Amino acid sequence: MSVSDDERVEPDAERMRLLRAVADDLRGESSESQQLAALLYRVSDLYDESEETTPEEIYRNVRFILEVKARGGLGR
């Protein structure tokens, strides 16, 4: 899937690093903190110059993560 220029967020290495640092700080033992860290890390991909993703793709991915969590995991 190709990302068009109008869907692409401008790369911002500082913002990407900040989001990932916050995600690392939040990651803990609880499933909620791990889930939130994963969501922040995924959002940080928008600002990573090496990633080709769109806000819509991030939204769909985050929605899937939340749905899996609500079902109790992938195996259910």
Image (tube, helix red, strand yellow):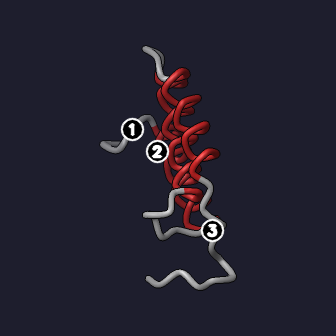
Q: Is the C-beta separation of discs 2 and 1 under 8 Å?
A: yes
- Residue holding disc 2: 68
Vertical relation: 76 (above or below) 30: below
Residue depicted at 44% across the width and 82% down the height: 1
Q: Earlier in the sequence, mark 3 or mark 1?
A: 3
Where the C terminus falls, by quadrant?
Answer: top left
Crowdedness near tag 2: few (<14), some (14–19) or many (≥20) residues, C-alpha within 10 Å: some
Residue depicted at 48% across the width and 27% down the height: 24
Q: Earlier in the sequence, mark 2 or mark 1?
A: 2
Q: How many labels were placed on the picture?
A: 3
Residue depicted at 57% across the width and 47% down the height: 16
Residue depicted at 52% across the width and 55% down the height: 45
**Residue extending furthest toward the right:** 6
Q: Nearer the viewer, mark 3 or mark 2?
A: 3
Q: Amino acid at mark 2?
A: Val
Vertical relation: 12 (above or below) 74: below
Q: Earlier in the sequence, mark 3 or mark 2?
A: 3
Q: Amino acid at mark 1?
A: Gly
**Residue extending furthest toward the top:** 29
Crowdedness near tag 1: few (<14), some (14–19) or many (≥20) residues, C-alpha within 10 Å: few
Q: Is residue 75 left or right of residue 12?
A: left
Q: How far apart, in angstroms, are the residues tagged by discs 3 and 1?
A: 23 Å
Q: Position of residue 48 (x, y in %)?
A: 51, 57
Q: Position of residue 25 (x, y in %)?
A: 53, 21
Q: Residue 21, labelled with which disc?
A: none
- Residue holding disc 1: 73
State which quadrant residue 40 falls in: top right
